[in-house]
Amino acid sequence: MADLLSVQQTETTTLLPALFNPKSIAIIGASRDESSVSFGMLKNLLLGNFKGRLYPVNPNADSILGLKAYKSVLDIGEEVHLALIAVPREIVPQVLEECGEKHIKAAVIITAGFKEIGGKGKALEKEIIAIALRHGITFLGPNCLGIINAAPDVQMNATFARRKAERGNVSFLSQSGAVGVYGLEFAAENGIGFSKFISLGNKAMLNENHMLGLLAQDGSTEVILAYLEDLVDPRAFINTASLLTRGKNAKPILAIKSGRSKSGKRAVASHTGALSQRDDVLDFLFRQAGIIRVGSIEELFSQALCLSEQPIPKGSRMVIVTNAGGPAIIAADEAERLGAQVPELSEELKKELMRKLPETVSVRNPVDLVGDAGVGRYEHALETILHSGEADVLLIICTPQMMTDMEVIAGTVARLADTARKKGITVAASFASFEVSVMEKAEHILRQKKVPNYPFVENAVQACTTAIRFTQLSKRQQGEIVTFKVGKKAVEEELRNARSAFLKGPESYRILESYGIGTARHRFASNKEKALEAGAEIGFPLAISVVSPDIIHKSDAGGVILDIDNEEELANSYDRIITQVTNKKPGAHIEGVFVQELVTEGAELIFGVRYNEHQGHLIMFGLGGKYVEIIKDVSFRLAPITREDAQEMIQEVKAYKLLKGFRDIPAADMEAIVEGLLRLSQLVTDFPEIQEIDLNPVFAQKNGIVVVDARILL
């Protein structure tokens, strides 16, 4: 395992030339059968005009597609940089051994039938990993479609896909070969060009983290797309993506993530654990990394079309120009829903627009040129808006009317696209005719000037708002991990002395206090007399709860009583708790009760931590209380978090408006909430053995936060 990790930590710069810029390729398993995978790969390499040398390897053929064939890779008299392996799975180990003897350092294993089928396949995959490690071979796959490098000095299509990939600035990682083929087909049909295409397959050795590192260095890749079913190392993926999507040279990453983790099905002991099972937790982690998650292949590529062909907008102001009111209203609604601004235009701009437009038009935004609009109206409106400085994104809608010449209007849009590009304005079109001859001409004109066209306005708006979102993500600050002076030794002692994995109230409170996280005034009482003493010391009103290593959810066991106003009520409440818990949880060991001040002031929040073996520690924040799992108003980030992460977490939940103050509810101490999350992050970073923390409720007050209930699981 250690050897495999060392290979996975190899500097990505050493992988790029061997995989993506080989001077020679051996196609091992090359066949004359035109229906075979290997024949398709060799044909693609030849038709794509691969710039290096090709060596088909087949013990039963003298030549294939006009190229000399070799019985073994060992018979090739020259150096081989890359091996494409498409042989029956049983002989893959033998072939890899021969590649090692030939000193080939990179391979793509197309052959399927490994861990994806379980049992024998898993064992075979382990065997080929061991062989590769022994010979210093780095391989992609097995069970993959292959790779493409469309660079003019390489022109390598080492896949068996049917459609040719045109050269462009988009790179696509796909864990599924079928999704990869679908993507290549869609891209070819819609004019999307590729820099790299990478089919990850089983990810036995190279995975999405290596490939993301490669694409970060690739100057010809400007947009990254990914289809992923699992993440080998989510933390590494998030960290790499986070650097890649920030700053002046940021590259947008759009991803589809399908599937559900096994860990999400396990029983959990807290609200935090239950909520961390949700698939949309990944939305928050992708947001932390600056990755834009999409739901379908169509979304992936239609949004990539705008990102790859248009300048990234400088801001979020969208101006819509249309000859039809309905589609424009739909576009405006969708734009605002997705976070774009559709501002009313300035009086100066409206006046300038109306200088050459009839009184029937509307120039507020959307700018509705009405149904009889011809090229003259479009030209005046678009030129005026482009020079106004009031648009970051320009969406042009054109629907077919009797008096509308869509081809001529497309020509005007195409002509003005250069002006928009120089000004850094994103332009997208929605020419909505479904008459094939009309649309083919209009789209051809638009495509020549790299203006993406979407027949449905919703798709156009989604693409534009994705570009806006990327602008916002690229501007976010890197942030630094904040640490505080804390009582680390006290926590070490507390954990060392813990008698069970579940830490009870007194223990949990001591740990939190050691890390500067405020708790309600409290005392542990092992009997009724001590409970009365604690009550007198703390002062009324009070709340008491059972302390038992056998009871996690105290309320469910009748182990919590609130609003205790005097000594008599406290004595009766003590007896009632003991009776209720004994009846509901017979056999549970009761150590006593936890007596604490009754806190009611402030908004009820939840702070939480959940450890996942694949992700590490997840920090959770949201609206707390007993309905937390029903309301589910929470956000997540991977620990350790920065101050910026904490601030984003707070702003993402719906309760944020409440925390800023609402009617008679005073604004909460935001800095105290941020600091509380940072301290919690530091705690679990310092003590990774902590599996779960559930602080619910945490009262956010005018001056600080107060934890009222805490659970810690080791």
Image (cartoon, rainbow, N blue to C red):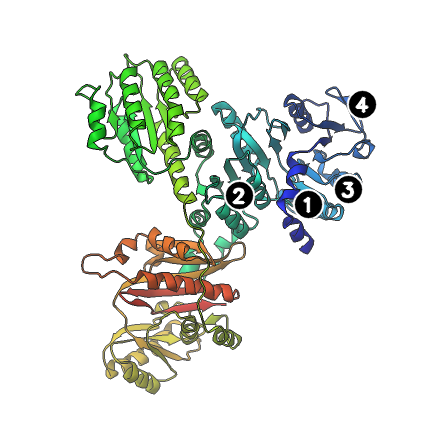
Q: Residue at x 63, y 43 (%)?
A: 13
| Above/below status of 260 relative to 394 | below
| Marks 4 & 1, CB-CB < 8 Å contact | no
Q: Is residue 703 left or right of residue 415?
A: left
| Position above or below: 563 against 482 | below
What residue would you read off at disc 2? 229
The reply to whether discs 3 and 4 touch (Cβ–Cβ < 8 Å) is no
Q: Which circle's residue, 3 or 4, is located before the other in the chain? A: 4
Name the kind of residue labelled 4 in the image.
Answer: Asp
Q: Which numbered tag is attached to residue 125?
A: 1
- Asked if labels 3 and 1 touch by Cβ distance under 8 angstroms, the answer is no
Asked if the residues shown at circle 2 and circle 4 are in contact, with their CB atoms under 8 angstroms apart, the answer is no
Crowd around label 2: few <14 · some 14–19 · many ≥20 (10 Å): some
Camera-nearest label, 3 or 2? 3
Residue type at tag 1: Glu
Name the residue carrying label 3. Answer: 100
Query: Mark 3 packing: few (<14 Cα in 10 Å), some, or many (20+)?
Result: many
Q: Amino acid at mark 2?
A: Glu
Mark 1 vs 3, N-terminal side: 3
Residue placed most toward the observer, 452 or 114: 452
Q: Secondary structure at mark 4?
A: loop
Residue beneath disc 4: 62
Residue 632 appears in view: no
Q: Secondary structure at mark 3?
A: helix
Residue 592 visible: yes
Between tags 1 and 3, which lies in front? 3
Kindly state the secondary structure of the residue where label 2 is placed. loop
Instruction: Residue at the far left: name it.
Output: 359
Q: CA distance from mark 1 to mark 3?
A: 17 Å
Give the residue at x 64% y 21%.
47
